[in-house]
Structures are given as C-alpha cells and as structure tokens.
Amino acid sequence: MVFRFFVFIVFCVFACAPVKEERPVKVRKGCLDCHPKYGRLLSGKVVHAPVKDKNCYGCHRPHGIVGGAFLKLDRRLVCVPCHRDVVNKLRGKSSHKPAVHGQCLKCHKPHSADQKWLLKSSSGKLCLSCHGEVLMGRNVHRAVTEAGCLKCHDPHGSKSNLYLLRVKSDELCLSCHEANEMGEEHFGYKVSRGCVSCHNPHSSDGKFLIRRFYHKPMVSGQCEKCHVVKEGVFKVKQYEDPNHLCLNCHDVKKSSSMHPPYEQRKCLECHSPHASSHLAMMRGPSSKLCLECHAYPYKGVSKGKGVHKPVGEGECVSCHSGHTSSNAHLLLKPVPDVCVKCHTFDMGAYVHPPFKKGDCLGCHLPHETKQPALLKQSQLELCKGCHESVKKEMGLFSLHSPFGSGKCSGCHDPHVSRFRPMLKAQEPELCKMCHAQLWADMKGVKKHGPFGDGRCSSCHMPHGSDYPFVLKDEEQKVCYSCHKGLKEKVRESVFVHTPVAKGGCGRCHRPHGGERHWFLRRKIRDLCLSCHSDVLKKGREWKVHAPVDREASCLICHRSHCSDQQWLLRKGQAYVCRDCHMVNSKLVKAHGGIRPSYKTCSECHNPHGGLKGKMLWEFEHPPFKEGKCGVCHGGKR
C-alpha cells in the first residue's frame, strides 16, 4: 500500500512539471539558396565535377582567402590540386604559356560550358584567337580544318617535343601520309622524314604547302645536287661538312666587316637548306635567331620600354646585313644614314654638333637601354659631358624644374632647331609649354611690361640662380633694373617702408600682372592691414577715421615706398591734418576754446580711429580727461 502511494506521488510530480518545448531544427543552407543566380552555371552541357557535386567549397571558401571569388588559393594555383597531371606536362620540352602562368580561365570556363573540357569555344577558334597567323596562307592543311589543332598539339605541354606536339613531327605526318605513296610528288624519292623542313604544317601560298621561301634545287627535284640517294636514304654529297655544299653555288665575298658564320662558311647556322617561312630561308625569325648569339643585358627587363623598335620587333636585318658590309657592325649604311631612314627631322638653322657630325651613337645606344630615347646615360649626365656650365649651374640655390630634374629636352631640341640655343620654341611660347596656367590666369587683366611682352628671361634665368624663383638677381635689384626712378627715391629718403628696405617687392605686388592698379595683391586698405592690423580696433565705441574707410585710404596720408617724413607720411603731420581739418571757430570750440596746433594733433588723437567718437587715445591723463587743460598749460581752459 505504501509503495503504491509513493508511485502515485512521483507520477503527480512529473505530471505537474512544465513540458519542455522542442526547438525547431535549423536546416543548413547551401550556396545556391542565397545565390540563386549562380544556378545558371549548371546549364552548360559540360559541368565542372565540383559544381556537378554541388561542392562549391572544392574551390571556394565561405569567408575566403583570396579576394573577389573567395577562392581557397590564388587563381594561378586553385586548379593545381586536382589537375596535377597538367602540371607535370608543363615541365617538359615545350609548354603552353597561359598554362605556365596559371591563366587557366583564358581557355576554360570554371563552372560549366557547352564545349568539351569546359572550353570557352571550340578548340579551333580558341587556338586561332591567339595564333591566327598560322592560317595566313591561301592553302590550308586539311588536318587543321578537319581534325583541328588538338590532332597534333597537346594544349598544355609536351614532354619531349617542341611546339606542344604530341609526338615527333615526322611521326605525325606519317600517321596520315604513307611514305610509299608520296614518291610521285617527291620526284620519285621515298621521303620519310624532315617533312616540316620543306612544308608548312598549317598553311602556305605555295603548292603542297611548300614554305614561302625555298631552295630552288629542292622544288625542281634536283636533290642529287647536294645529296647522294642510296636505297631511299639521303646522304650529304661528298663532304663531311654540309656547309661546304653551299659554296658550289654561292661565293663568299670578302669585305671589311663580315658576319662570323658567313666568314667561317657556316651557312646552316642561320639558313635552312630546303625551305623556310622566313626571308632568305632563315632558320627562324631574326628576333630569335640573332639572339642565339647576340644577347642584350636588359632583355626582358624593360618590356618594350627603352628598346629600339626594330630590335623589339625582331627586325635586325632592317639595319644590319647578314653577310658582309663595308660599314662597321655589318650596318647596311653608315650610322647616320641608317638612322635617318626611320628618324626624320625638321630643318633648322641650328644643329647640335654631334648630330651634325652624324655621331648618333655618341648619345644613343643602338639596341636597348634603361634610359628613354635609347640614351647611353641620363640626359643630365650626357649634357654635362660636353657642357661644363651645367656642372656649375646644378649647384645653384634655385633650379628651373626641367633643368633640376635633368630633362634638358624639355626646352632644348637635341638634334635640330630653328632657335638659339637649340630651343624648341622662342619665349614666351617655350615657357607656355609648362606655365600655360599662368597665362590663363592673366587673361583679360593688365600685364607687367616684361611679362606682357613675353620677355621672361629679362627677370628669370633659364637653368638656375642663387635667388628664389630662378630670378637673375635679388628681387629688388631685378625690379630696380627697370624702375630706376624709384631706386633713387628710396636711396635718398630718410624713411623706407620695411618690405622695400628688405627688398620684398613681391609682398605687395604681383610680378606678372593683375586686375588692380600697380598689380597690387589686394585692395590697398586690406593689403596694408595684412601687416598693420593693430591700427584698427573693433568695438561699439570705436570710431574709424573717415579716410581709413576708403579704398585708397592709407595712401591719402602715407607713401607706399619711402618718405622724408616719419611714418612714411606724404608731408609733415601738420600739413596732412590741415588738408581736411581747417582751424575755425567750430574746431576751437571743440577743443574747449583753445586754438589747437597742427603739430600736436597726434598727441591727443589716434590718426586711424579712437573711442567716444573723438578718436582720442585709449589712455587719457585725468586732467585732460576732465577738460582741465589749464592745470598743466596755465591760462584759461
């Protein structure tokens, strides 16, 4: 009975306990739940395996390491973990540049595509987008049009063959062309190797895809001129060195300058014996062929900058002869004649001496340099070599910007000019090349004489100076060179305005011109107050002297440069005040019946303004303040 009661109590306790609510299970969202627009990436006929498995994290991370697409690795490396077989191909004899540089997306789409291997377009179109030159001939190899590029080439790399070939070129040709069946086309000879030495594998203007430039005995079937054919095997005729065969038809001409391979009878170092796609049956383009022997120190560094255009385009033969020349360095013509073939110059009365002598290489390097315009050194160093004055001028206090930065060609033409001394233009047109804004600012305003006449050099030095703004002399002396009358006045005056005494004309005047009289920088009153702000005070009880409120206020009483009177007054204080304030009964009454003296006006009055409307000085003697003048002066008030 007790047990049953205990069980009943336990049941009641649990029955009364609050029921725990079950939390809803959160379903983890996939990438496409938030990015539905990327669902279209699955629409292609071929889908990238991770995309097909909805494994976005195969390439991406939700938070990302590499910005943009939140890739797991750098774009150049993200494909590597899955496509290591491709990476191994890149270590072979030849490799596709985009693959080497990790530019997989140049050919492939990352998610899905309508082409096999996720290619952006058909392999033929894709290859020709970069290699369009292979189909420039009128006759196109059927293998290219029907089978496509990948019939012969691997798109990534080849372990043992050049040009990304899947197998050696001869094997590729014989996979379609039976050697026994080609005898008729080859004048009865059974040819089984060296196909591409005569034929272009892609296209050609010649019949049977014969390369553009060919050896005449070869196309006429005169193979035995150079070869001995025995049982279908070609051997070089009677000489151990095949180069000697060339001498049967081609004489070696002597000259003062000879190309070493030509002089040593090593014709095959440069030429193909049968046919070539390059001029004069060269083994390859001169851009590559010449560089096999002639390397340049900056090759690949400048990426086209500082490289002579023919060098950059591989046109070595545009300047040099391949065999002999009567000029140094196998040049087609003497140095100046070779240069002017491409570089033309306007005629001028003044010619730079090195240019006049035809010494182009005195300043320029013929192939490449780290300096602009193929210069041997920086412009400054080159010019200093002949112009001793440049060395001295570089040590001056103030340097003209083009000169200071070593850009002599900013003002001078290094070859030919119509102006002395080899200037690109006359002043002021020359100065306007850099200082056009200065002329724009002065448009429509009165101009300072030298500036208006375009005589910049009357004030400034062209290269450098010991004075600011490349001035020819101290600022004041430059101004005095024209303003001689002012110079005499200042020299003879007792009192001189401080800026004038210190030679700071530019503190008040604009040197080139302006809309105000005397080319002042501000209105006269504002200009004076910029230094003499203490002469005016603000306040309700402060009254300004009437002349001070006028535009030319200060010059009513003062002179601007110099004076024989204290405070640069135009005349003695008595006469300055008397010009406006005549002594009459009203003035006497205002002074308590005492006739004031003009000589002592400023003893009581502030000439610029003062308190209580009387313009009195701020601190007053008590008797004077109370009007008890007689305490000190005696007599009546």
Image (spheres, helix red, strand yellow):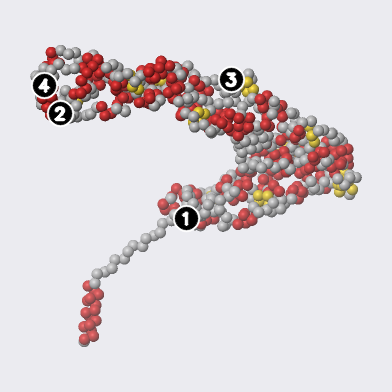
Q: Which residue is mark 4?
A: 634
Q: Which residue is mark 3?
A: 419
Q: Earlier in the sequence, mark 1 or mark 3?
A: 1
Give the quarter of the figure containing the N terminus: bottom left
Q: Are marks 3 and 2 in contact (CB under 8 Å)?
A: no
Quadrant housing residue 225 = top right
Nearer mark to the viewer, of 3 and 2: 2
Q: Earlier in the sequence, mark 4 or mark 3?
A: 3
Q: Earlier in the sequence, mark 2 or mark 1?
A: 1
Kindly identify the residue that appears in the image at 66 percent across and 42 percent down.
Answer: 297
Q: Earlier in the sequence, mark 1 or mark 4?
A: 1
Kindly identify the residue that appears in the image at 33 percent across and 19 percent down.
Answer: 563
The answer to whether 480 appears left or right of 378 in the picture is: left
Nearer mark to the viewer, of 2 and 1: 2
- What amino acid does circle 2 point to? His
Kindly identify the residue that appears in the image at 49 percent across and 20 percent down.
Answer: 458
The answer to whether 605 appears left or right of 340 in the picture is: left
Instruction: Determine whether the residue tagged by mark 4 lies in a helix, strand or loop.
Output: loop
Q: Which residue is mark 2?
A: 621
Residue 416 in the image: state x and y as whole percent: 63, 23
Nearer mark to the viewer, of 4 and 3: 4
Residue 312 in the image: state x and y as whole percent: 66, 37
